[in-house]
Image (cartoon, rainbow, N blue to C red):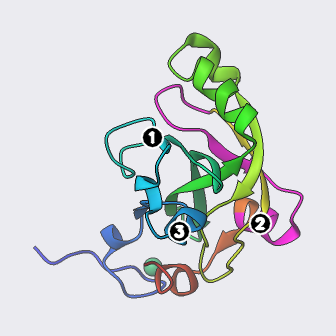
Amino acid sequence: MAAQQCEMCGRPVQAHDRHVRFRLPEPVLAVPRQEKTPGSWLSHDSPLTSVMMQVPSVGAFVRALLPISLTGGHTVTYGLWVAVDPRDLQRALAVWWEPAYQDLRLDGALANSIQPWGLLAAPVSLAVRDPGQTPYCSASPDPQLSRVLNDQWPHDAILDSLP
Ligand SMILES: [Zn+2]
């Protein structure tokens, strides 16, 4: 059976609801030993499975989901890193596997670039939607990031930009 094609962009329909999970925050990628920097802490065995990390003199980071709505009801979801105050990392760690996690709210800055916009270091607020998932990027005082979170986007612009 032939794959169903999208009427808007011609791609197979199943090629739209993509998930992209960044391995490391860009500031950590930029230091020579990355997450192997002495004194680094990761919540899990590897950067890809970790949901929190701290790297000395680089910063503290929490993983978050950033969904981008495409026209026609599809969603591209980024699993990216958000830089937070180290005290907020401790606050998150204290509740992450507890019932209080669902009330966790954090403010930080994007630590990965999202193409085609960029948006590295854009301020963002995080909120928990599902206790089984990392927090979601919920709002931003940055006008461009706010549009990314709230608008619907054409398929080609977003899907052509995926890593
Ligand atoms: Zn399409």
Viewer-side label of 2, 3? 3
- Point out which mark residue 31 bears: 3
Q: Amino acid at mark 1?
A: Leu
Q: Amino acid at mark 2?
A: Leu
Q: Residue furthest top?
A: 99
Viewer-side label of 2, 1? 1
Above or below: residue 53 compared with residue 91: below
Residue named by callout 1: 42
Residue 89 vs residue 1: left or right? right
* Percent position of residue 68, x then y: 60, 63
Residue 158 sits inside the magenta stretch: no
Would you call the spot at circle 1 few (<14 residues within 10 Å), some (14-19), or many (20 or more)?
some
Viewer-side label of 1, 3? 3
Residue named by callout 2: 145
Tell me the quarter of the picture where residue 136 sits: top right
Above or below: residue 45 compared with residue 143: above
Q: Earlier in the sequence, mark 2 or mark 3?
A: 3
The residue under the point 66% across, 34% down is 89
Residue 134 sits inside the magenta stretch: yes
Q: Amino acid at mark 3?
A: Val
Range covered by the magenta-colored residues: 129-148
Residue sitting nearer the eye, 122 or 11: 122
Q: Residue furthest left?
A: 1
The residue under the point 75% across, 37% down is 106
